[in-house]
Image (spheres, helix red, strand yellow):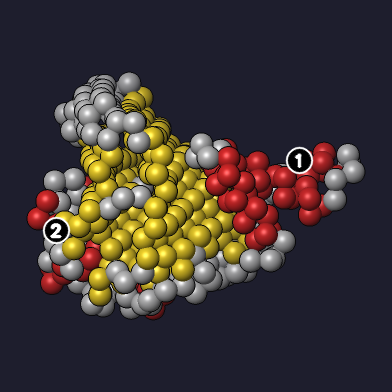
Amino acid sequence: MEQHSHGAGIPLQVRSERSRSVNPSDFPAISIRDEQWRYLPAERLDGLDRELTFFSGSLEGLSLKETTNESCGNIGLPEDLIASQVWALGQVKLIELFNGQETGLLTISNNASKQGLQFLIKNEKFAKNTVILNHVGSGSLAEVIEIDVADESDLTVISIQNLDDDAVITSSQFAKLGRNSRFKHIVVSIGGKTIRLVPTVTFAGEGASVEMLGAYFANGDQHIEHRPFVDHNTANCSSNVAYKGALQGAKAHTVWVGDVLIRQAAEGTKTYELNRNLLLTDGARADSVPNLEIETGQIEGAGHASASGRFDDEQLFYLQARGIPELEAKRLVVKGFLNEVISQIGSPELENELNALIEAKLEGKK
């Protein structure tokens, strides 16, 4: 496919045609002229666009094995400079999930700069499991995660970004779904100066389904960016993508770019993607870009929706008319708005903790 230009020579790029390589020299320097970095200036990355060192923080919880990335690459390959630099480190943490394990928590704590970390998560055939990746700390971290969801298996992966105010994280997460498998991917991004997650799903067998959910709260001068991509490359599979965010602060900025591709071979596909943003203060900016490419007319259904707006004045009036103070009314509205996603986590203790963090942000305590 030839590269075309528009306006001041800015290149256009179809999502499915994005370059993929494990070699950092195959990627140009990060620039806002590149569509995938158009909203995120390189200076906010705390050096992650330069050479990385292998992760030196702590990993607590799930049992891990050491391996190399020679066993990786069948699920996804780096699509940007930072992910390729993680790959170049050559070290991988392997998480093997078997039937009967059910739920595992891994706390990833990093306080150093320019760190790289790569995971391979393998869910065996017929297994039903949940993995929670809880990111904390004050450093800058680049991640690459590959997720193998075997035939007839059921896996939930939850990625929580609850970092310190000066922390930076980028995470490229690739999942491949086997025949008749079920995959739920939940993202909750609350703490961190700069957060950028790119979750990608492809299919390796018919009858598979994926649900991708996200909740985020941007405060102060936070930049929170999510770019989910579902590549329907196999017939008779389904996907549902729903991200909801709230913004508070004159410099708060969120970006959601949702891409869904239905290839010619993917007959019988059913898909929908949704993004909703709640703007709590003047100056907050939410960029929302849903994209849908369809190469075959033989599908069950496809659609997308996006909306960003302020509080519903009637809803607030209703609550205040019943004696609820304005701050408490706003807290209830925001909590209800985001809890539609957070309640899908399935851990009451963790859900309560995340809701408490959101309330603290609303009150300006975090």
Residue in the image at 56% along x and 65% along y: 252
In this orientation, which residue lies closer to the viewer: 273 or 56?
A: 56
Task: Give the secondary structure at mark 1.
Answer: helix
Q: CA distance from mark 1 to mark 2?
A: 54 Å
Residue 171, disc: none
Q: Are marks 1 and 2 in contact (CB under 8 Å)?
A: no
Question: Mark 1 belongs to which amino acid?
Answer: Gln
Residue closest to the eye, 179 or 55: 55
Pointer 1 residue: 315
Q: Which mark is residue 68?
A: 2
Q: Nearer the viewer, residue 303 or 227?
A: 227
Residue 11 is situated, as x and y percent measured from the top left of the image, at 24, 63
Answer above or below: position of 353 versus 166.
Answer: above
Identify which residue is drawn at 18% across, 45% down.
Answer: 75
Image position of 34 (left or right of 196): left
Question: In percent of the image, x 40 and y 69: which residue is there?
Answer: 110
Q: Around disc 2, counting alpha carbons within 10 Å, would you say few (fewer than 14), some (14 to 19), or many (20 or more)?
A: some
Per the image, label 2 sits on a secondary structure element best described as strand
- Residue 114 vs 355, above or below: the answer is below
